[in-house]
Image: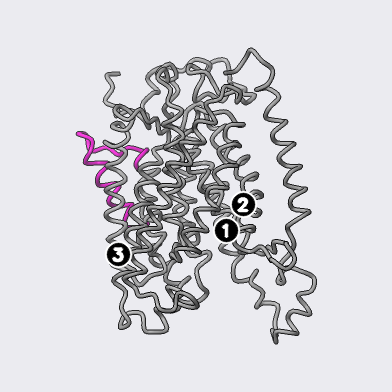
Amino acid sequence: MLGGTSLPALSLPAVCFVWQIAMIILFGVFIRYDEESDAHWVEFKREHNITSDIENDFYFRYPSFQDVHVMIFVGFGFLMTFLKRYSFGGVGFNFLIAAFGLQWALLMQGWFHSLDPATGKIYIGVESLINADFCCAGSLIAYGALLGKVSPVQLMVVTLFGVTLFAVEEYIILTLLHCRDAGGSMVIHAFGGYYGLAISWVLYRPNLHQSKRLNGSVYHSDVFAMIGTLFLWMFWPSFNSAITDHGDGQHRAAINTYLALASSVLTTVAISSMSQKTGKLDMVHIQNATLAGGVAMGTAAEFMITPYGSLIVGFCTGIISTFGYLYITPFLEKYLKLQDTCGVHNLHALPGMLGGFIGAIVAAAATESVYSAEGLINVFDFEGSFANRGVGTQGGFQAAGTCVAIAFGLVGGAIVGLILRIPIWGDPADDNCYDDEVYWEVRVPEDEESIPPVLEYNNHMIHKHQDM
């Protein structure tokens, strides 16, 4: 806890300096430019009969990279600013752990996916940057479950282990099991969601009610969070299509995600309104459940799920996610002692798991008449040692991949949670959670220093029918 020893006060600068110096050393040893970002590109062009610089992968991938990068730093960051007194921590710590995580991700993913055995080097290009951002997303999702209850040093530890676990489960799912998961329903959302939930479960605080007055939003904090929602919502088609195959796969992934997102908005609004006797909307649902269609579409985005199939996915996940906020989150806290600040179970874990199984069903149902013989090979990458794999088998492996992601999240999260229970991390006291003043210089006007209870109208954790 804060106070007492000087270790917590010193640990954040120490961790940032030491880990960043470690990154510099490791990058110096392992990381190099790939052939498309190296100065030898001129020779590479000539040797491979490439006529124009426009064929450099940068020009195909960079627009998607920009969109994904905005989602990671602006979308996720502002989505977490809903708490009335924790906006600095929401967007600021998101910034910190994403900046560290992407560096560690380039190394971890490089060691697993692109280490050159001849030179012992990792060669990075624009696609590596996209994958590193994806890798960070798992830890940022986990942060959502821990928001306001952990210290920045604990978040750095969550990210260190989160990125490491992500790289391992991604290698198992995409390379060994040969699953397709372009938008990361399995490897990003299911893993990140259950990773954060497992950590939060281990770090259960029985006296968290002492900070109950701050576990809610005010009018302007909900508006800021809605900015995050809209950035995520607009750019999710780029997220799901960023690393798909050029051509029809990328095109189809963007269309399918676009439609699923639109559909989930309408069902979210419908269920949110129906849940209140007055018919009013709850901003919690609109900020979060409207994005569930994008999460659930991640695996099947590049498959021939059809446009109306995409609308059905969005329709169902909007309903399921909103019901999650209404009933599952209160149930998890009351009976399983699971304190999920942002409700990542309803936006990432559950829709991610559903997305993985939707992908398995769509893959198993694929036919040559719909895809064409060459299309099946192209979409599911039935080449090399996987040339004889059938679509039914592929569907089975897709389902297995979803289970692997969930298992990695739950087991890895439980272990990391135990590490974070060691009392050296400077985490806030039970009566100091959800408050920026613990870790930030906050300049509050004198007339705003006390928070009247009437503003506690929007609580993400407790089913709220309060008598004001």
Residue in view at x 57 percent, y 40 percent:
94
**Quadrant in the picture for residue 260:** bottom left
Is residue 224 at least partly visible in the picture? no
Left or right side of 278 for 182: right
Q: Position of residue 236 (x, y in %)?
A: 46, 57
Q: In which quadrant of the rendered image does the C terminus lie?
A: top left
Residue in view at x 72 percent, y 68 percent:
118
Tag 1: residue type? Asn
Q: CA distance from mark 2 to mark 3?
A: 31 Å
Q: Which residues make up the magenta segment?
A: 261-285
Q: Residues within 10 Å of mark 1 (few under 14, many from 20)?
A: some
The majority secondary structure of the magenta stretch comes to: helix
Q: Earlier in the sequence, mark 2 or mark 1?
A: 2
Left or right side of 427 for 199: left
- Residue that numbered label 3 is attached to: 361
In the image, residue 329 above or below residue 429: below
Q: Residues within 10 Å of mark 3 (few under 14, many from 20)?
A: many
Tag 3: residue type? Ile
Q: In which quadrant of the rendered image does the N terminus lie?
A: top right
Q: Please, which residue is most extreme toward the left here?
A: 277
In the image, residue 378 above or below residue 222: below
**Quadrant in the picture for residue 376:** bottom left
User: Which color scheme did the rendering employ for the protein?
Assistant: one colour
Q: Position of residue 189 (x, y in %)?
A: 44, 50
Query: Of circles 1 and 3, which is in front?
Result: 3
